[in-house]
Image (cartoon, grey):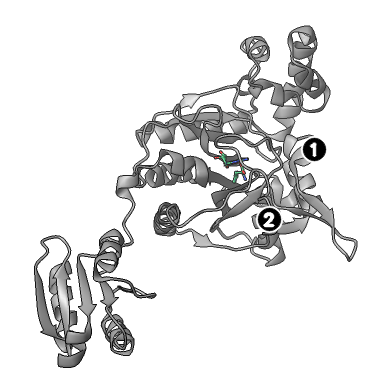
Amino acid sequence: MADKIRPVRGMNDVLPDETPAWQHLEKEARRVLEGYGYAEVRFPHLERLELFARSIGEDTDIVEKEMYTFEDTGGDTLALRPEGTAGCVRAGITAGLFRGQTHRLYYIGPMFRHERPQKGRYRQFHQVGVEAFGAETADMDVEQILMARRLLSDLGVGGLNLQLNSLGKPEDRRAYRAVLIDFLEARQDQLCDTCRQRIPRNPMRVLDCKVEGCQAVVRDAPAISDHLGEVSQAHFDRVRNLLDAAGVPYEHNPRLVRGLDYYTDTVFEWTSDQLGAQATVVAGGRYDGLVTEIGGPSTPAVGFALGIERLLALMDDERIPGKAPDAFLAPLGTGVEASALALAENLRDRGLRVWYNCGGGSLKSQLKKADRSGAPVSLVIGEQEMADGTVLIRDLVTGDQQSVARGEAAEIVRTRIG
Ligand code: HAM
């Protein structure tokens, strides 16, 4: 035998026993998001590297060290998308969508980051992402939070904590950055190596470092929410008031900064205490400057992405609909296949889900397979049934069986499945 080819580390196959949960999640996501007026967009998994560098930020972990980049044979430097917002905005600009109207868009698909794989953190992972363009008012931020809450609840996932913060406008952040750098520089010796390096380039990232020493330092750090300009303060107050009015509990976390540079004003994350270190299931916020940053007309925007693998880890299998067929057809003996295949097709023409056992086998082994399929009934065509044009219908729960004309089989199966 030839050597096995190993899969790429951190990239997983989704096998048939797992796909029902994925499909259920995706179906529910489409139903809920479309119910709020979101329409699906699909854009390439590959984009020019520059798109991500400019939007996510040169000094972020993602752009600095986590992207899969390569030069194609035409000499263009491309990258596998590490997230969806940049590509979604690029697609909207390319299509000339941003002309003042509101657009609510969503996408579902894989993202790629060269992170250290661990539970809940993969190199190919999947997101349901939503992006709303054209509304600068707080109702759009809050509608998205309500929508995420509804999706989580419809998927049976409870017990998540919503954290909220405001990062203000770029000018608020510039002023805050200077204050924060002063604070951190005075305590350099208590910070980890990575954070020490972050101080001049991206000091806000120090605020969400997980190292204990760093956390102790930032506990007393100045908070961005104390440095918001008037407009941002009013926006944040409005978001909080609307959340209160809608009865959505949240925690204002002044250290919530997010790992991507494009955010302005509102940022939020839903975390679970059942996921260990990779606790964030849904994350997002407002990014009013991004469309212009990548060459489009000034357009306010807000969005979030939900990590599918992390959400699946929290979902209750009981809610996932089964895939069992309505009937399992067992051809028994030689020379019966043509009639058995014809009966299976006839039942499918009438809208029934029929699994046909290819490959033969004894009655016992075929009934075992029928049981495993979850079908309520098994249909058997053997030599006797061939001779008299009938089919044997066996109830797999009670064990009762009856021989009927093939033309009646569909009706009987239908009655049995209710
Ligand atoms: P993000 O926080 O980088 O934001 O990712 C969003 C979610 O994707 C995370 O909360 C997590 O559930 C999941 N996720 C991220 N990285 C991994 C990984 N390596 N393995 C498994 N799951 C992961 C964004 O991507 C933004 N584009 C969200 C957004 C949309 N903001 C505005 N619009």
Q: Which residue is mark 1?
A: 64
Q: Viewed as shown, does residue 261 lie left or right of 136?
A: right
Q: Viewed as shown, does residue 162 lie left or right of 406?
A: right
Q: Which residue is mark 2?
A: 87
Residue 98 visible to the viewer: yes
Q: Nearer the viewer, residue 73 or 202?
A: 73
Is the residue 272 above or below the residue 109 in the image? Answer: above
Q: Are marks 2 and 1 in contact (CB under 8 Å)?
A: no
Q: Earlier in the sequence, mark 2 or mark 1?
A: 1
Q: Residue furthest right?
A: 75
Q: Picture coordinates of residue 18 (x, y %)?
A: 44, 52
Is the residue 62 above or below the residue 126 in the image? Answer: above
Distance from Cα at disc 2 to Cα at disc 1:
18 Å
Q: Nearer the viewer, residue 276 or 373?
A: 373
Residue under the point 74% across and 31% down: 171
Q: Badge 1 local density, few (<14 within 10 Å), some, or many (20+)? A: few
Residue 84 visible to the viewer: no
Q: Picture coordinates of residue 84 (x, y %)?
A: 63, 51
Callout 1: helix, strand or loop?
A: helix
Quadrant containing the N terminus is: bottom right
Is the residue 340 above or below the residue 158 in the image? Answer: below
Q: Quadrant of residue 26?
A: bottom left
Q: Quadrant of ligand 1?
A: top right
Q: Nearer the viewer, residue 71 or 149?
A: 71
Q: Is mark 2 within 8 Å of ligand 1?
A: no
